[in-house]
Amino acid sequence: MSTAEEPTAIAPHDQYPTGQPSGGAGAQDPTGQAFAGVRDLHLTDSVRSARDDARAQGGQASEWMPHLPASGSPHRPPGVDPASLVWAETVAPGGYTHKVLARGTRLRFDDPTGDACAHLLLFNALEPVERLNVADTQKIPWQAYLGEDHPLLSGDGRVMAVVTSDSSARHDAFCGTTTDAWNERKYGDARPHGPSPSGRGLFLKAAAKHGLTRRDLPPSLSFFQGVHVEADGALVWRGSAGPGTHVELVAEMPVLVLVANVAHPLDPRPGYVVGPLRVHAWRGTATGPDDPRFTATPELHRAYLNTVDYCEARGL
């Protein structure tokens, strides 16, 4: 299974590889030629025909799908035992993904083209009312810019995850993600399956699969497209560090991960530019008292004590 290496301004789910546009049977392309309807492409006039048609699709693969099993990923991070992988996926430009990960799981994002933008939300997988708090994530470590050893904190004073490796250093914890209104104004479209879906819209779809609603979605942070605050308070988009960068996290508690790979809201380019995002996760261990990070600052030490207390009471 191959992964596209070139950025694209068009969401792959809007390219209709079967030749069938969203307008349905009888719709026409810009030249006026009618597209073939789904019924002309698939023989489904009986249960047996429908079964045979469905099974005929079984050998097909998409570059925008999870690798199952995860150990079969062609993009396995260096030094990672394939048998330890629990998640391997390439997220399409304008796509989203979600996963529940155990405590101690290592999570890695890769930007192969320099145009990915991984908007991230975290929830306590056991009690989703606890979720990423971007304000505390900036305040507790006394650092507004994300980077190596930066904790991602919940509103309950616990460390949900921490950045363990970062070769990009171009991230954003100020702007959140795009909304439907923003994308409709800038690109003329914000449909989740259209050419320019919003991050908020995709988060909503991912959240719904776990029983969460719009009211459950807090502000998010994003990796690979940097934002800097100027002396006068202006937010300046810095773009990416180029192709081939990565960010690694470790989950310090069981977490529900929501990811939307969409254009950054401050990206000044007129087109909806976003590239593929690679995601891998593998079994590991949470940060322990012997790790220097555990007691790096009084604030972080307290947050880790809160996290360990919660997890041990749960038998985790």
Image (spheres, helix red, strand yellow):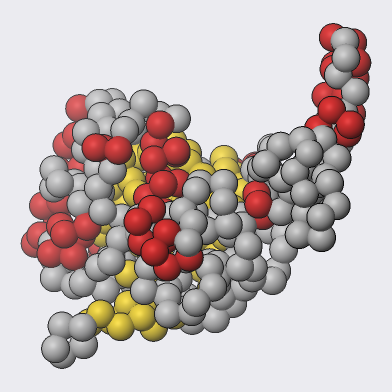
Location of residue 298 (image quadrant): bottom left
Horizontally, residue 273 falls left or right of residue 170, namely: right
Location of residue 35 (image quadrant): top right
User: Residue 279: percent from the left, percent from the top?
Assistant: 55, 54
Location of residue 20 (image quadrant): top right
User: Residue 256: percent from the left, percent from the top?
Assistant: 38, 38
Name the residue at the front extreme.
Answer: 32
Q: Nearer the viewer, residue 70 or 267?
A: 267
Asked whether the viewer can see residue 38, the reply is yes
Horizontally, residue 49 falls left or right of residue 17, namely: right
Horizontally, residue 312 falls left or right of residue 67, namely: left
User: Residue 313: percent from the left, percent from the top?
Assistant: 20, 27
Asked whether the viewer can see residue 279, the reply is no
| Residue at the (54%, 81%) spot, across then down | 242
| Residue at the (45%, 46%) spot, across then down | 202
| Residue at the (39%, 64%) spot, across then down | 185
Residue 313, compared with residue 77, is above or below; it is: above
| Residue at the (77%, 49%) spot, across then down | 28
Horizontally, residue 48 falls left or right of residue 175, namely: right
User: Residue 138: percent from the left, percent from the top?
Assistant: 18, 65
Q: Nearer the viewer, residue 303 or 137?
A: 137
Residue 262, compared with residue 130, is above or below; it is: below
